Structures are given as structure tokens and as C-alpha cells.
Image: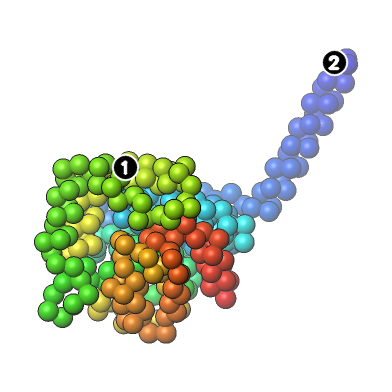
Amino acid sequence: MNRRSILTSGLAAGTVAALAGAERADAAPARRHVTIRARDGVRLFHRDWGEGRPVVFVASWALASEMWAYQVAHLSDAGFRCIAFDRRGHGRSDMPAGGYDMDTLADDLAAVIDQLGLKEVDVVSHSMGGAETVRYLARHGTGRVRRIALIAPAGPCLVQTPDNPYGAPRAVLEASIAAWKSDFPKWTRENQAPFFTPSTSQPMQEWLVGQMLATPAPVAVATFRGLMDADVRPDLARIDRPTLILHGDKDASAPLEISGRRFAAGIRGSELKVYEGAPHGLFVTHMDRVNRDLETFLTA
């Protein structure tokens, strides 16, 4: 091939590439990267994938945005824009020395929604993320939110009190904290099996356990104290958006009777779907069903 042919071929290839790039730009306009800052200046890392109606994912205790990989894969293919963020102290977000109380964590969720300019947003959460979502709605209102899905929510009040027989004695919860402060990896391994089912692949288990072990023990302790000290029962009555609750009847971390059913009883008009045989990690152990139920609910 002579020099002119090489040049012509290069120009043609460049034209094709440019056209392909233009087509991709038309199909999925590039979004400007936004650095999300909490009120106290903490930087919150987020993942933004897909196009369509926005869905914000709020992670479980001691897990980060990566936990939602298989929900993001499914819902982005179904036409949703999926946004998952790392709670402060988790994943790639900043790790401040404070701000792990429920009010501040709820304000962090508000920062994500507000600074990305989201409206008519759906919120999907797991475990502790459910309490954060409920507190966000109580503190910031429901004006930007369309629907919420709570997967195995933890709470609404963890501590047993005279008016809350469903909670656990504070001493039991403090014993768990003491174990984390002594040997968080050991506690995680000892409590790994109940989070999954016997059929959950070992690589899948190791993937999630690795995420948990990447969370610093002081952060795990501080965020759990934030959950333990919170009582979101009064907040439930303020939710006026369609709410779906998915909960397994084999959940050892947030048992159905003291968590899922309490959220359902407090949120007017909510729908509770009980997964027979599902543990706390149902977002991976019962992935296909969870994804279908989420898609159906969020498409409505």
C-alpha cells in the first residue's frame, strides 16, 4: 500500500470512528463528572451507569457500592440509570473521624440526590441502608423521590425498650461491637455462612466478604452505633411513596419478624414480599427474583 492509500485509509478509519463516536453520543450523552461533597466537606464516591429514570442504591452496613453490581447490571439493561455511592468511610469515599450518626448519613444521601440534580428518583436500599433511606425521607421530604424499595431492612429500632419488645438487649449488641473491636475478620468469617445459602458459590461469598473486610473496623463500629442509637419508627408514618419491602424468612442478621414486618406495619400502603428460605444476602442468593421484583416495581 502506498503513502496515499495509507493516508486515505487512515482518514476513512478516522471518519468511521468519528461517526461511531457521534452515534454513541446521540444514544447516550456523556454526563459531566460530579464530585459529591457532604455538608462537612467529606467526598462521597459514586458509580453512575446506564441511561433512563434514575435509581439510587444505598448500601448495607460495612459494604460499599460494589455490592450492587448485579442489580445495576440488570436494571441498566432494563433502561434505568443506576447510581450507587460509597457511604462515608467505605469504599473510595473519604474516611472522616465522625459523622456516622443516622442524621448525617441521611444528609449524605441527600447530597448525592441533590448534587446530581436527580428528580423523580427511585431509591433501593439494603439492611442499614433502609434506615438511612427512611431517615432521609423524614428529614428532607419525599419531593424528589418516586418509589422506594427496602431489601432486608435493619431496624426500625434495634434496641429492646419497654415500648419496643422486638429489639435486642443493648448488652447483646454491645457484645457484637466488642467482638469487632477485638477481631473483625474473625467475626466476619464466623458469621459468613448465615448470610448466604449452601448453594451460593464460594467465589461469590468471597467477593462480598472481601468487601466487608475492606471496611475499617472503626468505621464498622461507628456506623453500627449510628444504627443502634437511631429509632426510625416515627419516620415510617411520614413516607407517602409506594414502598416495596423484600425480606427473607431465614434472615439471621435482621430477622423478618423484628425488622421487615415492622417496616411494613409502619409504612402505610407498603407491600411486603417474603422470600421463603432467603437469608440476609438475598440480593445475591436470590438474585434473579430480586432483580425481577425490582424491575417490575420500578417500571410501574
Q: Can I make out residue 286 in this image?
A: yes
Please identify the quadrant where the C terminus is shown.
bottom right
Neighbours of disc 2 within 10 Å: few (<14), some (14-19), many (20+): few
**Which percent across, then down, holds residue 109?**
35, 60
Kind of residue sitting beneath label 2: Arg
Q: Is there a contact, CB below 8 Å, between mark 2 and mark 1?
A: no
Give the image quarter of residue 102.
bottom left
**In-image side of 110 versus 183 (left or right):** right
**Residue drawn at the location 18% of the way across and 77% of the way down:** 165
Neighbours of disc 1 within 10 Å: few (<14), some (14-19), many (20+): some
**Residue drawn at the location 57% of the way across and 66% of the way down:** 292
What kind of colouring is applied to the model shown?
rainbow
Say which residue label 1 marks.
213
Say which residue label 2 marks.
3
**Residue drawn at the location 49% of the way across and 70% of the way down:** 120
**In-image side of 100 versus 274 (left or right):** left
Query: Hey, which residue is sitting farthest bottom in the picture?
Result: 269
- The nearer-to-camera label among 2 and 1 is 1
Give the image quarter of residue 92.
top left
The label on residue 146 is none
Q: Can I make out residue 110 in this image?
A: no
Query: Hey, which residue is sitting farthest front in the picture?
Result: 198
**Which percent across, then down, holds residue 174?**
13, 57
**Which percent across, then down, holds residue 21?**
70, 42
The kind of secondary structure element at disc 2 is helix
Q: Nearer the viewer, residue 298 or 20?
A: 298
**Which percent across, then down, holds residue 139?**
29, 71
Mark pair 2, 1: CA separation: 58 Å
Q: Nearer the viewer, residue 4 or 154?
A: 154
Kind of residue sitting beneath label 1: Leu
The kind of secondary structure element at disc 1 is helix
